[in-house]
Amino acid sequence: MLENKNNAKTDISELGEFGLIDHLTSQFEVKHKTTIKGIGDDAAVISPEGKMIVTTDLLVEGVHFDLSYMPLKHLGYKAVIVNLSDVYAMNAIPTQITVSLAVSNRFPVEALEELYAGIATAAKLYEIDVVGGDTTSSTSGMMISITAIGQADEKEIVYRDGAKENDLLVVSGDLGAAYLGLQVLEREKQVFKVNPASQPDLDAYTYLIERQLKPEARKDIIQLLKELEVKPTAMIDISDGLSSEVLHICKNSKVGCNLYEDKIPLDPQVINTCEEFKLDSTTIALSGGEDYELLFTIKNEDFPRIKANPNLTVIGHMTNENEGVHLITRANTKIPLVARGWNALNKD
Amino acid sequence: MLENKNNAKTDISELGEFGLIDHLTSQFEVKHKTTIKGIGDDAAVISPEGKMIVTTDLLVEGVHFDLSYMPLKHLGYKAVIVNLSDVYAMNAIPTQITVSLAVSNRFPVEALEELYAGIATAAKLYEIDVVGGDTTSSTSGMMISITAIGQADEKEIVYRDGAKENDLLVVSGDLGAAYLGLQVLEREKQVFKVNPASQPDLDAYTYLIERQLKPEARKDIIQLLKELEVKPTAMIDISDGLSSEVLHICKNSKVGCNLYEDKIPLDPQVINTCEEFKLDSTTIALSGGEDYELLFTIKNEDFPRIKANPNLTVIGHMTNENEGVHLITRANTKIPLVARGWNALNKD
């Protein structure tokens, strides 16, 4: 759990609630000029520029993460990323976060330091201020609740409901790797249980594992779209799997969609590992989740601006609502798309 | 746990994550003109008026609440109130909240409906929009994480650090009742364990129990201060006990304080119940916590404006930092004030 197993272990009650918060948050400098007051009062004060974007996500130990293979530094990083991804999906720029943490007394202060180091790394890289939060004990396990705040000009904000018939459906990056990374890590955990001396060779899975343990939010895509002067008509981030997100856009925008199986971008490690695990790579891309790529629709006339870009793939087009939402398979059969995305409520 | 024990019990997995969120949040209408987009996209969009205030609080089952005597409707209500209280403590008006919830599968949908009914009641009464959130499973117990957003003109915002020497220290309402309400409820729980057929007579404790189970945030005091044209120099809400909050103001404002024991406002039920429980009422008021009253400092010249008001009590005055922070007892002895506030991290 700790990167350095030799570290001292300090019981969190030694510092007390305020002492612990001070200890963990003193590293956070205020960088944004919009942050008027960060940590240290009843609430943070922000000077908004344009409209404010607010989103929140909750990560629960044993449901969203397993500390037997998730280093705490990575967990802190990922907890920030999943929230930033939602802000980018509004075509907005995240500027502040609050971090609330519930931890059982099995976690020493040093463990929380690791977690906060990951939070601080993400905050630095994505240029956001940590402006508040709450730290408390739990009766068992760890929970992290992060709220991200972003800013955008009203005319730049992209919702889920703006897709129109004939718009193109575009996805950033590639899909399915994070889910397969989780499968590889779960397999290694089982192997380790049987034989703790085994030395795993994970070279064939490095990309998959990185996508699972250290995802990134696509700030670069938001910047790229601005540079290309392409404003998506609808946008969502892929947290629950491609099919679930396509259905969200279709439902909110009241359109149908034809999604082409042969267009779905897959990394070679995804293809190879699917073969090894005897999994269908399309199913993994459609339902795997946790990719944190951006899925968006653009007007047909904007296609020339994005077509040369290796980070963006056109995977389908929007149709009339009456035509429904379909996957067009490699065999050119048309099957209705159903959401089988990762569902945190069905896991227990 | 449920108000109507005959209710049907629907497993939350029957609805799925999105179905559950839709089911629970469909009752929330957008009321504020500043809410551009509420629930239903990657993030909420808010049109700020003035500066934005952001605060977050986390309530954990077994640490902050006990469902054996806390009805879920009250819990939902209280979870909102504790966050709004922080916004009022900035002399700001709360306008939106997000609600994140982690629940184990021991809670049926009907239990979450009760919880959300309490959230909706608070939202209606305090005129705030529920604009987002996250609902997930937990491996055990319930956790509620709420982020409140408020708005204020920059010149109206009151921080903890503005108190000056000779300012008067003022508190709203009365203190200690919420903590004693908890003691009464804990005692009844123990009695019930021994004799489940016992019929508790709680008439002597109605105020105490209400303060514990259904606290209010002092929106009225913020409005009153505006009407009286009194802007506090520093302000904080009393969540951890009077002594802890006085010390926060003194530390942040770099001042000392003389707090007068005989001025601390106590309800007669607090005095009577302290006698019954053989507790010192001053200790309870200083360290009890969960009162959600406002503690603030005002300039001496503002005293005539507040002195006639039964909701406000002057309990001390600020001194030079070098003089330290003291309680002046009824016997006119001067003892250093120490924080023994309720500390969620020391409870486990």
Image (cartoon, coloured by chain):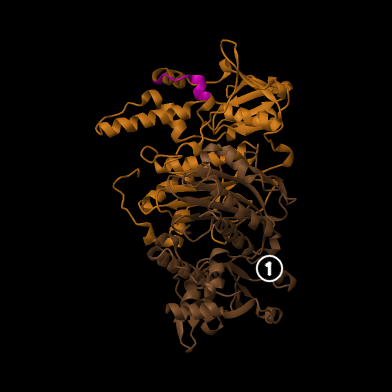
Chain colours: A brown, B orange
Q: Is residue A158 left or right of residue B195?
A: right
Is residue B26 shown to the viewer in this render? no
Closest to the observer, A54 or B63: B63
| Disc 1 secondary structure class | helix
**Could you say where residue B214 lies in the image, as x and y percent from the top left?**
46, 35
Q: Which residue is mark 1?
A: A220
Q: Residue at the far top: name it.
A: B331
Residue A197 within the segment the image draws in magenta: no
Residue stretch rendered in magenta on the structure: B277-285
Q: Image check: A288 left or right of A220? A: left
Image: B221 above or below A299: above
x and y percentages locating residue B341 in the rendered image: 53, 30
User: Which chain letter matches label 1?
Assistant: A
| Quarter of the picture holding the N terminus of chain B | top left
Res. A38 image quadrant: top right
Q: Farthest residue toward the bottom?
A: A331
Which residue corresponds to the image point at 64% horizontal and 56% vertical from the top-left?
A121
Residue B186 seen: yes
Amino acid at dot 1: Asp
The answer to which of B339 and B155 lies nearer the viewer is B339
Secondary structure of the magenta portion, mostly?
helix
Judge whether B242 appears above or below B158 on screen.
above
